[in-house]
């Protein structure tokens, strides 16, 4: 986080603004560029209220350092910024930035303004108490919710958000601690598919905006003629309602994004509460989820309404999934397509989350990931995350080639549902399964990693708990392991360690990374050596499948 320094004509040194962070899509999926170089976010998101007090903020920053993170995601709230209408208090912004700098961390600010998780709990008291001026969404049965309607006249949190962005430029342009800003949090309406407030009903009876006609036509495969009202859209009513709410929420977020962009170049994103089926059996605790708008926040930035969001909120740089449930390959792939880049601002902090981080980075070119709530975890709970982040830290420079282009990578996460994957790199097929000592069933374990194609027939592996066998699509040839070298990475590049062969490569047949930590005792009398750095290089060679015919 160094800043440039110049010398004036009088000989006095003056700080210059650092180049702002930016998203670069010129070579494929979006990469975050910081200080001129690709920056991979190893993030942690603090609990919602942690940044509101010095002690809890300091504890959260310590947890980020303990997790080997390089970035902390921290909230800034409308109720703190504008406790009295028109009077802005920026102390919370300064505290987060100064604390993060002192800890050697970057920051992604989360704006909890008009909406947070389908509600409006972070609105100031002067907004909450004035329901005539700030009307709420209304459910189908007529009940009034605590969620501010996006259809009401007025700008809600616009002035406060703009002031936050101005302040960031005032105090951070010389440092560029802030990498990105999230606008709102998991917007949408819970409880029904569409707002039935008076303001919403008026908007629902108006024609569909001209720029959405083609989007909605392609979504439902039915032409939307000019002048057709929202209420008369053909097709599934719940899909129509969700598109209507997406247009409303996206319109407000676009207002904030445009206002913020006018004063700051920092990238913006907004995040989504997913529409995944949620399978949790916790007595006394009901979790909303499923496929029906309103059981998840209707109108949020989901792939099913991607066209509406992209058209209505073009100033938003990324749409990001909060990933706790669902199929990772589906979710990561859909959001990569929706945004032209993938960032995961919330995910699990355990071994499953650590594995999903490597899958997202290796297979879906994520510009970063951020498990949630690390500041409430004991250090043993963060062991897998801390380990994976350390492995990424050591090797992230190897994800970019010498000419600045991204390296070819593949990623994987193995569990009982996905115990095996086949990854193709050119004519080479890597079959990846979970690792376990001889005589031990791998069921119930995880294997996760990413593979980097470094040069012809040379691969780098990062991760734990897997074994890889090689084949080729050319039936005339077989693949053998020429050499496997354990090692470490870092600012000075690759440092070779043990040359692995024999038992550590299953007799030269498999490239193996044991699990981290203790493993179950094996009944096999010959022990396995399970200590491993989590990073190794493999060079393969080819030999014929069959002996050549003898010459007469």
Image: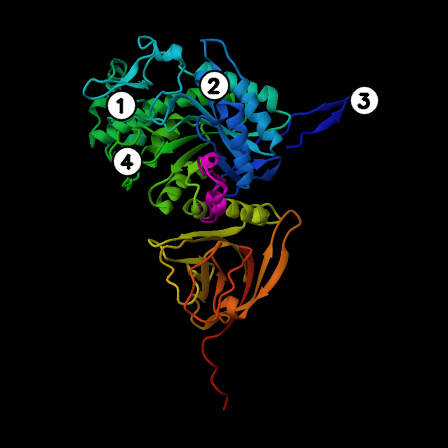
Q: Residue at x 48, y 45 (%)?
A: 380
Placement of 122 over or under 449, stated as above or below: above
Residue 323 falls in image quadrant: top left
Q: Nearer the viewer, residue 507 or 398?
A: 507
Quadrant location of the N terminus in the rendered image:
top right
Camera-side residue of 343 and 515: 515
The magenta segment: 357-385
Left or right placement of residue 434 versus residue 151 in this view: right
Separation (CA) of disc 3 from disc 1 = 65 Å
Q: Position of residue 95 (x, y in %)?
A: 56, 23
The reply to whether callout 3 and callout 4 are in contact (CB within 8 Å) is: no
- Circle 4 residue: 289
Q: Are discs 3 and 2 less than 8 Å apart at CB? A: no
Residue under numbered circle 2: 161
Kindly identify which residue carries mark 1.
226
Eyeballing the image, is 426 above or below 8?
A: below
Dots 3, 1 in contact, CB < 8 A: no
Q: Nearer the viewer, mark 2 or mark 1?
A: 2
Classify mark 1: helix, strand or loop. Answer: loop
Badge 2 element: helix
Q: Residue furthest right?
A: 10
Residue underneath mark 3: 11
Neighbours of disc 4 within 10 Å: few (<14), some (14-19), many (20+): some
């Amino acid at each position: 986080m160094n800043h440039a320094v110049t010398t004036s004509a009088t000989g006095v040194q003056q700080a210059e603004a650092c180049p702002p962070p930016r998203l670069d899509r010129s070579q494929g999926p979006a990469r975050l560029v910081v200080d001129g170089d690709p920056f991979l976010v190893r993030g942690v998101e603090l609990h919602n209220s942690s940044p509101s007090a010095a002690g809890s903020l300091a504890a959260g920053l310590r947890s980020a350092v303990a997790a080997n993170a390089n970035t902390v995601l921290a909230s800034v709230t409308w109720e703190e910024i504008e406790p009295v209408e028109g009077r802005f208090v920026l102390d919370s912004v300064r505290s987060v930035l100064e604390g993060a700098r002192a800890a050697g961390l970057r920051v992604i600010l989360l704006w909890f303004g008009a909406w947070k998780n389908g509600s409006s709990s972070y609105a100031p008291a002067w907004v909450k108490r004035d329901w005539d001026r700030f009307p709420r969404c209304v459910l189908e049965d007529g009940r009034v919710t605590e969620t501010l309607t996006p259809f009401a006249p007025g700008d809600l949190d616009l002035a406060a958000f703009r002031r936050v962005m101005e302040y960031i430029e005032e105090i951070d342009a010389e440092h560029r601690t802030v990498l990105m800003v999230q606008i709102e949090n998991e917007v949408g309406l819970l409880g029904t598919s569409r707002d039935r407030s008076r303001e919403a009903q008026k908007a629902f009876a108006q024609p569909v905006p001209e720029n959405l006609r083609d989007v909605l036509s392609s979504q439902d495969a039915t032409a939307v003629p000019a002048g057709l009202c929202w209420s008369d859209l053909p097709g599934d009513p719940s899909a129509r309602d969700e598109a209507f709410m997406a247009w409303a929420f996206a319109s407000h977020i676009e207002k904030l994004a445009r206002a913020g962009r006018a004063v700051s170049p920092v990238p913006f994103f907004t995040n989504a509460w997913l529409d995944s089926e949620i399978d949790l059996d916790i007595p006394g605790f009901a979790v909303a989820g499923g496929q029906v708008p309103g059981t998840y926040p209707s109108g949020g930035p989901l792939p099913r309404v991607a066209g509406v969001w992209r058209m209505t909120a073009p100033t938003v740089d990324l749409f990001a999934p909060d990933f706790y449930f669902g199929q990772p390959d589906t979710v990561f792939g859909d959001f990569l397509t929706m945004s032209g880049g993938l960032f995961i601002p919330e995910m699990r902090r355990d071994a499953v989350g650590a594995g999903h981080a490597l899958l997202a980075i290796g297979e879906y070119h994520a510009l970063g990931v951020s498990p949630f709530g690390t500041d409430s975890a004991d250090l043993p709970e963060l062991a897998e995350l801390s380990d994976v982040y350390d492995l990424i830290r050591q090797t992230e420079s190897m994800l970019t080639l010498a000419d600045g282009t991204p390296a070819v990578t593949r990623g994987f996460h193995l569990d009982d549902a996905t115990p095996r994957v086949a990854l193709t790199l050119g004519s080479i097929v890597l079959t990846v399964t979970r690792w376990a000592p001889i005589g031990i069933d791998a069921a119930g374990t995880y294997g996760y990693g990413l593979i980097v194609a470094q040069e012809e027939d040379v691969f780098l592996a990062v991760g734990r708990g897997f074994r890889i066998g090689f084949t080729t699509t050319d039936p005339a040839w077989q693949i053998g392991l020429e050499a496997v070298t354990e090692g470490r990475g870092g600012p000075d590049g690759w440092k070779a360690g043990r040359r692995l062969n024999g038992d550590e490569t299953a007799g030269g047949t498999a490239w193996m990374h044991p699990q981290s930590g203790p493993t179950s005792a094996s009944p096999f009398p010959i022990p396995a050596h399970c200590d491993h750095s989590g990073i190794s290089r493999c060079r393969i060679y080819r030999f014929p499948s069959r002996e050549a015919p003898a010459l007469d």
